[in-house]
Amino acid sequence: MALFACSLNLLFGYAGLLSFGHAAFFGISSYATGYMIKDVGLTPELALLVAIAITLVTGYVFGSLAIRRKGIYFAMITLALSQLVYFIIVAAPFSHNEDGYQGVPRGELFGLISLQNNYVLYYVILIAVALTWWGVHRVVNSPYGEVLKAIKDNEPRVTSLGYNVNRYKLVCFTISAVVAGVAGGLKTIVFGLASLSDVHWQLSTDGVIMMILGGIGSIIGPVFGSVVIVQIQHMLAGQFDSLVPVIMGLIFIACVLAFRGGVVHYVKSALNMVMKK
């Protein structure tokens, strides 16, 4: 979920594009990875690469349609496209509908390293997440990332300087979709399951809340937000399942009213004040 929140933060925090449809990319990759491992027989890394390729193409197509509009219209288009993917997967025979795509074996990395051992799996996933996060970090701190920030701050000015704004947005949307796809594929490898919740619109809203809680435009903020939200969901799982949406809503309201910069921003400010003293 940390990578999923990072994908949304890349798009909104640095390009100013709010998407409510990123669950589509997470879910497509989740199902594609499971199918490639279980039915096609590919090794986990190859299955993940195929899933990422599918997500990249889907992200490019969806982005080409969505970036023609701005603001709430952009967000609604992404939501509509995500729901289209959701209903396609519901109708697909291989998805097994509400039962989900179960029994995906972990397999062997490169055909050599068994992922059945939880410790081995943990470090493989950790490395994959760290490399993807580092890739996002490199993107936002590159010259391309600086242009994205300028587009968010003053799009007409960037257009007047001769930049093709829509092309930059499209590339950002596609990269963001790929990051969400990596998250979805890794989730299936870990749990051996792809379900409809992976492609449901509520997953996108959870990611948005994680991003806001941690700090929009902060490279580490979404990671912090995802840890907090996932821990809350786990603590309330079971008997208090019905309270999860209420708690999430309260967190969202609190962030909007009191922590607009995100918790990480306020923690950094507090630490800076302490260091100056």
Image (spheres, rainbow, N blue to C red):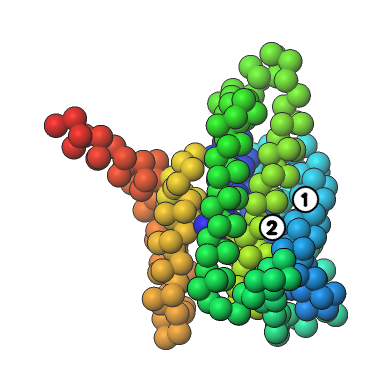
State if disc 2 and disc 1 touch (CB < 8 Å).
Answer: yes
Residue 16, image x, y percentages = 59, 36
Q: Give the mark nearest the N terminus, 1 or 2.
A: 1
Q: Is residue 105 above or below residue 183?
A: below
Q: Please tell me in which quadrant of the rendered image residue 84 appears.
A: bottom right
Residue 269, image x, y percentages = 29, 37
Q: Residue furthest left?
A: 277
Q: Is residue 64 left or right of residue 13?
A: right
Label ID, residue 104: none
Q: Please tell me in which quadrant of the rendered image residue 167 appears.
A: top right
Residue 261 in view, yes or no? yes
Residue at 58%, 26% in the rendered image = 146
- Tell me the SS state at disc 2: helix
Q: Which residue is mark 2?
A: 181
Q: Amino acid at mark 1?
A: Leu
Residue at 69%, 13% in the rendered image = 161
Q: Residues within 10 Å of mark 2 (few under 14, many from 20)?
A: many
Q: Which residue is mark 1?
A: 56
Residue at 57%, 71% in the rendered image = 121
Quadrant of the snapshot with the N terminus: bottom right
Quadrant of the snapshot with the C terminus: top left
- Tell me the SS state at disc 1: helix
Q: Work out whether residue 32 or residue 67 is closer to the camera in this orientation and state it.
A: 32
Residue 218, image x, y percentages = 46, 41
